[in-house]
Structure formats: C-alpha cells, structure tokens
Image (tube, grey):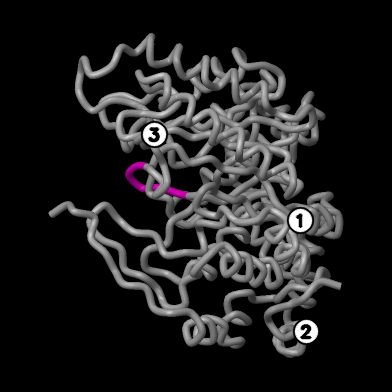
Amino acid sequence: MSEQIISADLVSSHNAARKADLERDYASLGERLDRRGIAIDVIRDKVEKFGVAIPSWGVGTGGTRFARFPGAGEPRDIFDKIEDCAVISQLTQATPTVSLHIPWDKADPNRLKQAASRFGLGFDAMNSNTFSDASDQKLSYKFGSLSHADAGTRRQAVEHNLECIEIGKTLGSKALTVWIGDGSNFPGQVNFAKAFERYLDAMREIYAGLPDDWRLFTEHKMYEPAFYSTVVQDWGTNYIIAKELGDKAFCLVDLGHHAPNVNIEMIVSRLIQFGKLGGFHFNDSKYGDDDLDAGSIDPYRLFLVFNELVDAELSGAKGFNPAHMLDQSHNVTDPIESLMLSAVEVQRAYAQALLVDRKALEGFQEENDALMATQTLKVAYRTDVEPILAMARLRTGGAIDPVAAYREAGYRAKVAAERPAVAGGGGGIV
C-alpha cells in the first residue's frame, strides 16, 4: 500500500463532515441529468479514470522577468518535489504521474523511481532543457541549441535529449517532450531556412534514439525568449516537424503558446483529424504565455478544447491517445493549492464535455442551426458538475474539498519549518 503524507484520519474526518451534503447534491444532479438521458454514474466513472500529470517544476514558486519572490517551504530538490506532488495526488486522486525536467531534476534514476513508488506515483513524459545553460555545460545555448550554427553546440543538445531518454527508460516513462527557445531577436540575425533545417537534422537524431514504444512530443511557441522569430513558432510548423520525423512524433499543444484569441480548439481538431495530436500542457493566459492556473481566465475555452477531445474519444478517432499535463508558474499562490485546483478544472472541463448531447449537436450542425448548436454546448457547460468531481474523489480516497483538507493538515507550515528559506532574486530588468 502506498504511503500517504496527509493523515488518512484527517482526510476521513474532513470527508465525514461533508459527505451527507455531497450525497444530496449528487442525487439532485443525478435526477436532473436523468431527465436529459444521462446516467450520472457513467460520467463519474469516466472522471475517476481521468488523470493529468503534474510538472515537477510547478510545485516551486515561479517568477517574472523582474523578480522572484520565494514561497515558504519551497522544495529543495526533486525528492521534495515528489513529496509535494504526492500531496496533490492524495487529495485530488487526479494526478497519478509526475513529469520531470532534466537537468533540473537530475538524480539517480533508480532512487527517483523508488521515491515516487513510495507514494504510488509514476512518471509521465521526460522534458529536456536546452533553453538555458547548466552549471557544468561546456557550450552555451545563448544563440540556440538544436538549430545553433555551431555543430558542436547542436551535438551537445542532441546528446542531452538522448540522455533524457535513457533516464526515462529506467523510470518507466514513455515519451520525451522537446521545447526549444531557439530563434532570433533581430531581422537578419539568422537564416530562417538554414536554422530550421539544422533543427530537423538534430531532431532526426533524437527521434532515432527513441525506443519503439515511446512517443516524441514537440512544442510550438510564437515568441519568448526570442522575440523576432522562433524556430518552432506555430502549430503548422509543429505539424511539419511531426510529419517529417515519423509515426512516433506528435504535436504538443500548450494553451499559452498562441497569440491572444487564437482558436485553439480548432487547432486541436486539425491535429486529431490528421493523427498528430500528442497531448497538452494545460494552463491559462490573458496576454501571452502567462502560465496561469488552468481555467482561471477562460474556462469556456478549456471546455471547448475538451469538447473536441471527447468528440474524438466517442467517435473512436484513429490513434487518439493524448497525454494530459499541467504546465504552470505560480507567483502569488501556494503552488500545491494552484495545482490541485488546476487538476480539478481540467477534470471539470472533461466532465462537462461528456454531457454534450452529441446527437442533437450533429443535427443542428447539419441543419445549419447556429443558435441551437451553440446553445447545445452551453447547456453542458453551464451544468455544475462539482458533485460528480467531489464524488469521484471521495470514492477513490481523495478529499471532497482538496484545498480545505490541505489547509487543515498544515502541510505548508510543516515543510516550511523543515526546508530552509530561499532568498529572493531579481531578473536584472528595471
């Protein structure tokens, strides 16, 4: 049996005080859904099986280009991060895996595997880092990595990705996510075509190192840290990469990696249609790649993304098997609380999308009844599915109200007393 960081007695007491109200709410919602021909227990069972990976880097406090303000009890290393991830998993029962970032989380793979298995955690996609320089790195990525003009720098970046695969093999991971910050800040700084060809050549070497049962995820991002051009700037380029590399290469969609108001759900549909949707980094944004909590700004967009995912799931789209991961930066909240709520918001969007009357929607689409088609989506979106999510947590051993249980446990104060305080720092921009 897996170890639990939060006392099982505390979680049990927390749930006992809320169980009766939850059961009444669940029964009431079940009656309303039954009138729509929806069996609430079927939705609940699907929610129970739905999981999203926690990013190891997400449990630490993020920052801005100007400054970083450390939080109390920040994790000192990957093993502290695993413990924080275990708390999220225990209370939400929605985050069974952790996604590591190398070299930030580099440690003995067998020790990492043992530490995670204590809490019943597995490992999701490995993430390589060639967008910043490590302390023991010989060549700098200041002017690029996989697309760098210097062959030695490209070789170093390729070897790093191959190392990530080797670490992941020991951990039981089945995917590698590659995101690069390569690009330019001035017109004329790079030759677009040559830089992209160098990138493709380097990626072909990485792809060749994949085990047969692994997938390769590539991310697109229109800007930052390069502000004039980036090598993998949009989903079209990302699709080209996946097609060029082969059947094990897929596009990873980060909701913040697009210009404001871009129709991300349509991009998702396109990638599903042509068999190249690898998965997601879920977050939210107001202006750009803000890495805000999932569903905190535009929960309807998150629902619309899941509307496409559920449509593909129910229609049996060929090769449909997206990876679900969070990717967020928390500057003013407790990262554990934010990640718990984000995992719940992703589940919420999934549950709401499962409530869409697909037959009615298709009919309205075929009849060009725009008003009723969009209202069909709104009926599902406006349904309060919280009783379903809470019941799923209760049945699987989680907390009915994860944040309340977490605060009752006093976990943050406990680790703050054990982990040395971290000094703040400036980003060098004034």
Residue 365 position, x and y percent, is 65, 25
Q: Which amino acid does label 3 sit on?
A: Gly
The quadrant where residue 336 appears: bottom right
Above or below — where is 35 with respect to 159?
below
Residue 231 position, x and y percent, is 40, 23
Q: Which amino acid does label 2 sit on?
A: Ala
Which span is picked out in magenta? 284-288
Mark pair 2, 3: CA separation: 51 Å
Q: Is residue 366 at least partly visible in the picture?
A: no
Q: Is residue 21 at least partly visible in the picture?
A: yes
- Residue position for label 2: 20
Q: Which of 262 and 207 is in front in this view?
A: 207
SS assignment at label 2: helix
N-terminal-most mark, 2 or 3: 2
- Label 3 environment density (alpha carbons within 10 Å; few <14, some 14–19, many ≥20): many
- Residue at position x 61%, y 33% from top? 162
Q: Do the residues labelled 2 and 3 touch (CB within 8 Å)?
A: no
- Residue at position x 67%, y 21% from top? 208
Q: Nearer the viewer, residue 10 or 209?
A: 209
Quadrant into which the C terminus falls:
bottom left
Q: Disc 2 or disc 1, which is closer to the eye?
A: 1
